[in-house]
Image (spheres, helix red, strand yellow):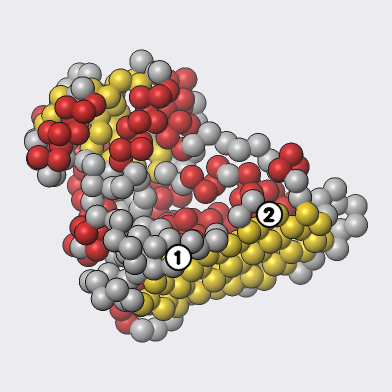
């Protein structure tokens, strides 16, 4: 049995994570910490767990092997470093932190303590995106020229997100910092090293953080990614388009179409679900299984840091209204 503490209910996914852990049958939620004491006490009572207003006291508990972090993004570094120093394994909601410097501090603490770390990248477990990765790796698309991903909902438009979601001091940003993480880490996974970025952020509902956003990224392999996210679009169909010199992959909802110059490719035209790669377990499930069975961790420190690098630089480009270059390996 794995004993887990829930670190804050701030993020909207926190309750779902707790329910998922309880459904596994191999996890016991023993404790809760929350920066909002009233919210934390209530949640702990619902979970049948102990509540601590002092994070250090919670991390001293012998019946806490690992923590699931849903604290405000601005507090991720503080909380994760404390957890690592206490010898607790870490699962965190995205993003890993607000800056690469904070990610480096987290990574150093995790590596020194020898604990295991996983960040929630659910889009990388889905059959459609696994197919895209397979096609890229197999060269059936040729050299990638353009990636376009759209991910949105109407949470800010119809006010079903908590109001603190728009507090820049807690969240670190708006639509791109949260929902935009998924297009960002998919682009990094598929296209590799980013070279330069521009951002266009909009404040449709007049809140302190952006609710409608787009980033254009050029990668070192000359591919361009157009990444769009929004909290003010009604019934937004997710879109994923991947274009190469020798093939094209279009994903719209559950519909998948592939065209390739490679006539011998078994995948041509509309692709049925049975032709897709098998869906992988959710990141939280993989993390639990890895801890219980001493297995590898998916979506680790390097993945989380790469996402934060994209996000941090995207916000610099927005604030300074310019194209920002990434530091390439070798200092170029």
* Residue at image coords 40%, 24%: 23
* Residue at image coords 40%, 53%: 305
Query: Mark 2 Cα within 10 Å, few/some/many (few <14, many 20+)?
Result: few
Dot 1: what SS?
loop
Q: What label does residue 59 carry, if any?
A: none
Q: Quadrant of the N terminus?
A: top left
* Residue at image coords 23%, 42%: 9
- Relative to 202, 270 lies left or right: right
For marks 1 and 2, the one nearer the N-term is: 1
Which x, y percent locates residue 57?
11, 29
Which residue is at the front of the view, 201 or 332?
A: 201
Q: Is residue 133 visible?
A: no
Q: What label does residue 234 carry, if any?
A: 1
Examine the rendered structure and indicate whether residue 283 appears above or below residue 155: above
Q: For mark 2, what is the residue?
A: 255
- Relative to 101, 258 lies left or right: right
- Relative to 45, 223 lies left or right: right
Examine the rendered structure and indicate whether residue 198 appears above or below residue 50: below
Which x, y percent locates residue 134?
69, 48
Mark 1 or 2, which is nearer the eye? 1
* Residue at image coords 78%, 54%: 270
Query: Mark 1 Cα within 10 Å, few/some/many (few <14, many 20+)?
Result: few
Dot 2: what SS?
strand
Q: Distance of mark 1 from mark 2, alpha carbons?
A: 20 Å
């Amino acid at each position: 049995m794995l004993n887990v503490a829930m670190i804050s209910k701030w993020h909207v996914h926190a309750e779902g994570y707790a329910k998922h852990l309880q459904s596994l049958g191999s996890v016991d939620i023993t404790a809760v910490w929350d920066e909002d004491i009233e919210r934390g006490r209530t949640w702990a009572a619902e979970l049948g767990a102990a509540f601590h207003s002092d994070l250090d006291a919670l991390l001293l508990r012998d019946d806490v092997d690992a923590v699931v972090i849903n604290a405000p993004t601005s507090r991720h570094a503080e909380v994760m470093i404390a957890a690592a120093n206490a010898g607790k394994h870490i699962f965190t909601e995205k993003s890993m932190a607000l800056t690469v410097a904070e990610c480096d501090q987290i990574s150093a603490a995790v590596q020194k303590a020898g604990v295991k770390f996983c960040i929630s990248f659910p889009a990388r477990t889905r059959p459609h995106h696994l197919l895209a990765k397979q096609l890229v790796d197999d060269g059936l698309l040729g050299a990638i020229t353009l990636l376009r991903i759209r991910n949105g909902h109407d949470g800010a438009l119809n006010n079903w997100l908590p109001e603190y979601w728009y507090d820049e001091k807690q969240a670190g940003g708006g639509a791109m910092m949260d929902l935009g993480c998924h297009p960002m880490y998919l682009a990094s996974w598929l296209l590799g090293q980013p070279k330069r970025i521009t951002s266009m952020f909009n404040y449709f509902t007049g809140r302190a953080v952006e609710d409608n956003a787009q980033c254009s990224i050029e990668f070192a392999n000359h591919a361009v990614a157009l990444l769009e996210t929004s909290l003010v679009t009604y019934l937004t169909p997710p879109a994923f388009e991947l274009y190469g010199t020798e093939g094209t992959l279009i994903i719209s909802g559950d519909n998948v179409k592939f065209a390739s110059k490679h006539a011998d490719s078994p995948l041509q035209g509309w692709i049925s679900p049975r032709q897709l790669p098998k869906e992988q377990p959710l990141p939280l499930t993989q993390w639990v299984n890895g801890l219980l069975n001493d297995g590898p961790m998916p979506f680790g420190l390097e993945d989380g840091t790469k996402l934060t690098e994209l996000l941090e630089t995207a916000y610099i480009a927005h604030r300074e209204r310019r194209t920002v270059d990434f530091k390439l390996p070798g200092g170029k």
